[in-house]
Amino acid sequence: MKFYSLNKEAADVSFKKAVINGIAPDRGLYFPRDIKPLSSSFFENIEDQTDHDIAFKAIEQFVSESIPENKLKEILISVLDFPFPVIELEKNVATLELFHGPTLAFKDVGARFMAHCLGYFLENQNSEVTVLVATSGDTGGAVANGFLGVQGVKVVILYPSGKVSDIQERQLTTLGQNITALEVNGNFDDCQNMVKTAFLDSDLKSEIQLTSANSINVARWLPQMFYFLFAYKKLKNKEQPIIFSVPSGNFGNICAGMVAQKLGLPVAHFIAATNVNDTVPLFMRTQEYSPKMSKATISNAMDVGDPSNFIRIRNLYKNNFTELKNHLSSYSFTDEETKHAILSVYNSCNYITDPHGAVGYLGLKEYQKDKSDTFGVFLETAHPVKFLDVVEETLKLKLPIPSQIQNVLEKNKVSIKIDTYDELKSYLLNK
């Protein structure tokens, strides 16, 4: 399969080339040229298949030109080595836990998959690739962990100073080796803009090979469709239509779910739940896309004012707003509403959500006010301990610290502070 740029001013490329490029030369995101639905028997018998088999059949058409079958299966076994539980909390409401990986965040799957792919592409080559990534929270830690020690790859992570949780910051600033953290005086959108600018900088392109590990990269983005397939495997026998509510920041996760739907996954509807960074909820009401400066919230991984992947979602539905609205609803919620949801779910279900999962829960309940006959799944995208201060203050209790987190708390933070793109460029050229 070929991938084309959504700006439509660059040549089609293979999966390998799309991964290494990160973003197309015309600054467009890569998108699969076509998406072939899986057979109806695949979904009819999905409960009889292993997660590895499901993932292989879902991703194969997108990568087979670049990765042979035996290598792809080997990668998937390495990447998918932890569970994805679906836990029913109340009538017609369940949560899909995506935080059982090494950094306790849903981005572990995409980051590890991309790291394995890039490592395979660079085998027996003398070239070096610099992975440049912006993070609003969990991406940095997942990418750092996934790429740690990968030969031929250096990772540079940009994160907004003072706008990620302490644990998130430690996960991306304490590993060393081939991982460097740049602490940016600004917000996530500033970090993301620096990354995009770097990809278009001819001085940089002539000196180093850059790629991105944000969800703009197809190898980070596409594997996220596995979650929705794994959840359906567990919920297939539900009598009601199944819907998913996805806490959304850069909109890569929900977009991947919509790709799974294009593969034939029987999903009735998607809800994009956001915090006060409400660019998409406003678009779904007004049909006007107006990016804005992102605002800091307690659900910081969603603090995105101009979500990169929303153009992919619009493209999936050929920029037909009516068709998009048939598949997607979007709501935004304040920090106070989020804290109230954390407390409410704990009191009623004895279940602890993180702030992002709580936003997903709120989005689901909002949609079900008029669609009570649906079975809803909200995605719990990070372990609540990653937002220790917020959760403990809200619930008035102490959370046990998992070993993965305890290990990074004992290490010293190492970061390089920068203010401008020129400082980033200088670092990349002289590191």
Image (cartoon, rainbow, N blue to C red):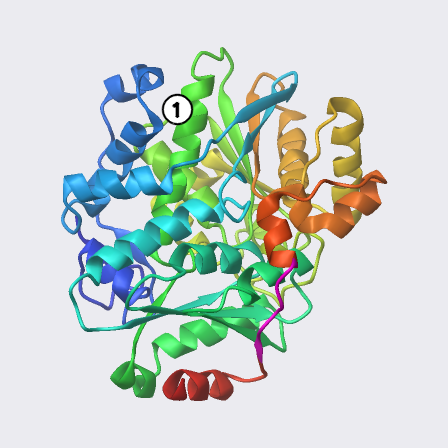
Q: Residue furthest right?
A: 396
Tell me the quadrant of the picture where the C terminus can be found: bottom left
Is any part of residue 143 visible from this angle? Answer: yes
Q: Nearer the viewer, residue 271 or 175?
A: 175
Whether 130 is drawn above or below 218: the answer is below
* Side of 361 where 309 appears, left or right: left
Q: Position of residue 297 (x, y in %)?
A: 71, 57
At 40% from the left and 61% from the top, the residue drawn is: 213
* Magenta stretch: dominant secondary structure: loop
Q: How many neighbours does mark 1 have within 10 angstroms: few (below 14), some (14-19), or many (20 or more)?
A: some
Give the left or right position of residue 331, taking residue 204 as reference.
right
Horizontally, is 247 left or right of 395 in the view? left
Q: Which corner quadrant of the image does residue 35 belong to? A: top left
Q: Residue at x 47, y 42 (%)?
A: 254
Residue 147 lies within the magenta run: no
* Residue at point 48%, 88% (across, down): 422
Viewer-side residue, 161 vs 332: 161
Disc 1 secondary structure class: loop
Label count reads 1
Up the image or down, 386 lies above or below 263; here it is below
Q: Position of residue 203 (x, y in %)?
A: 32, 88
Q: Amino acid at mark 1?
A: Pro
Q: Which residue is mark 1?
A: 266
Task: Report whether residue 315 is seen.
Answer: no
Q: In the rendering, at what x and y percent does residue 407 appear?
A: 60, 53
Does residue 7 appear left or right of residue 392 in this picture? left
Q: Quadrant of residue 355?
A: top right
Classify 356 as above or below 145.
above
User: Residue 113 placed where, x, y %?
Assistant: 34, 49
State the extent of the magenta-drawn residues as a range. 410-416
Which quadrant would residue 371 be assigned to in this image? Answer: top right
> Relative to the observer, which residue lies in front, 337 or 15?
15
